[in-house]
Amino acid sequence: MSEESWGRVRNELLKNVGKTNFTTWIEPLNLIGVTDGIASVEAPTKFMRDWVSRNFGEPILRELRASGLAVERIEFQVPDLRPIPATEVSRPAVPARKPAAPIRTGDDELPGAPLDARFTFDSFVVGKPNELAHAAARRVAEGGPVSFNPLFLYGGVGLGKTHLMHAIAHELYTRRPDMRVLYLSAEQFMYRFVQALRDRQIMDFKGMFRSVDVLMVDDVQFIAGKDSTQEEFFHTFNALVDQGKQIVISADRAPGEIKDLEERIRSRLQCGLVVDLHPTDYELRLGILQTKTESYRVQYSGLKMADGVLEFLAHRITTNVRVLEGALTRLFAFASLVGKEITLDLVQECLTDILRASDRKVTIEEIQRKVAEHYNVRLSDMIGPKRLRTIARPRQVAMYLSKQLTTRSLPEIGRRFGGRDHTTIMHGIRKIEELMVSDHQLTEDVDLLRRLLES
């Protein structure tokens, strides 16, 4: 196949998968040739090979056939590694745990935060809610050129942002010991900046932070409203991007949702890849529990667990991963101390407070207050008769969330919204469902409000 033909196939893939996906995953590929109905495609790394094969194998095969080639399947190759057919790749299993990496803080002269040795890619359980975030983090951790800068990870408490940040740093230290990698929290960035101002060493501060190859800042929402720190962060950000250095940022919400964050910083953060770590689903929670249980079986040898315990925990504890893992830790410790098998009865006895907290019911009144606060409208206007769009849309969002997060019927919801008819409530819910298909900002608003209400 000629370079020109492969170029046409790539152009079609660009239209189908979008610019970001194309630049990140398709552009680095190289078509070696087609022999006996097998197209050989080369990827620069094993991780990219596996990801492309699993997620883009079918579109590539389809476009190759559309170009007139008699291709039955694709073999994705990495130099010096065994080829892997697209049909051979399935959803990755949880990898075997490797010995924990040593705790690192960066170069001796860099003021980095210590890394948790437990937070590696091997211990990160991948599921649908965090699949894209994991893939993007792995791509950065390879240490090569990346098409997106910065990588911005956001999500609620305990969804894995910090875990991925530490995992990137650990991987870079292993793969690229020559690189200067600096991981720290936004609070530590501010502290170092204030200390430099106080000691009149601001030029040393600037030189130090601008000399790194990868800058990783956790919980960036902390600098919102702190004008001097934002000013310095902005200049540091620009200096590193201009040098082609990689930046990884995390926050508890999307850049556009961080109040009191300067518009120029918000704009810079949005110019890279912004990835939301969604709340965990049942399958992911169960996978996390199973992985954690395997490690505990070594620590608590001989301790038995009845069938259905992990499934029960995954179903009942839905807040975040930290609560989930904390519950399992407490359960194993308690069972070991009392010398009992871990049964559902023991779970009820040991985790009464956690299970009770997980049963907290969201009320319509709470939803109305949160939505009114988020959209900066008066609660009385939301419930009242006004039909201005600036009030009607938040009202419909509150109706939608009331239906999603409570067990109230449509007539009951209508009574809480100023005595409206149930058909009005139904119309409002359908309107939000329709808009969420195309309105990305509305979808982010609804997801954020849901997380706030369920936390």
Image: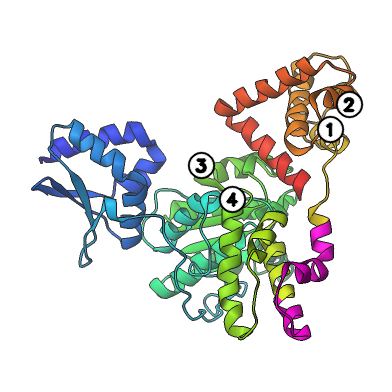
Give the residue at mark 2: 416
Give the residue at mark 3: 271
Q: What element carries label 2?
A: helix
* Viewer-side label of 2, 3: 2
Q: What residue type is labelled 2?
A: Arg
In contact (CB < 8 Å): disc 1 and disc 4: no
* Viewer-side label of 1, 3: 1
Give the residue at mark 4: 277
Query: How far is disc 1 from disc 4 in space, using C-alphas?
Result: 25 Å
Q: What residue type is labelled 4?
A: Leu
Q: Residue at x 56, y 79 (%)?
A: 103
Which range of residues does the magenta coloring cover? Answer: 332-356
- Name the side, left or right, on which 324 lies relative to 288: right
- Name the side, left or right, on which 292 lies relative to 449: left
Q: Quadrant of residue 177?
A: bottom left
Residue 203 at least partly seen: no
Query: Which sits in the foreground, 343 or 142?
Result: 343
- The reply to whether the magenta stretch includes residue 247 is no
* Viewer-side label of 3, 4: 4
In contact (CB < 8 Å): disc 3 and disc 4: no
Query: How far is disc 1 from disc 2 in space, using C-alphas?
Result: 9 Å
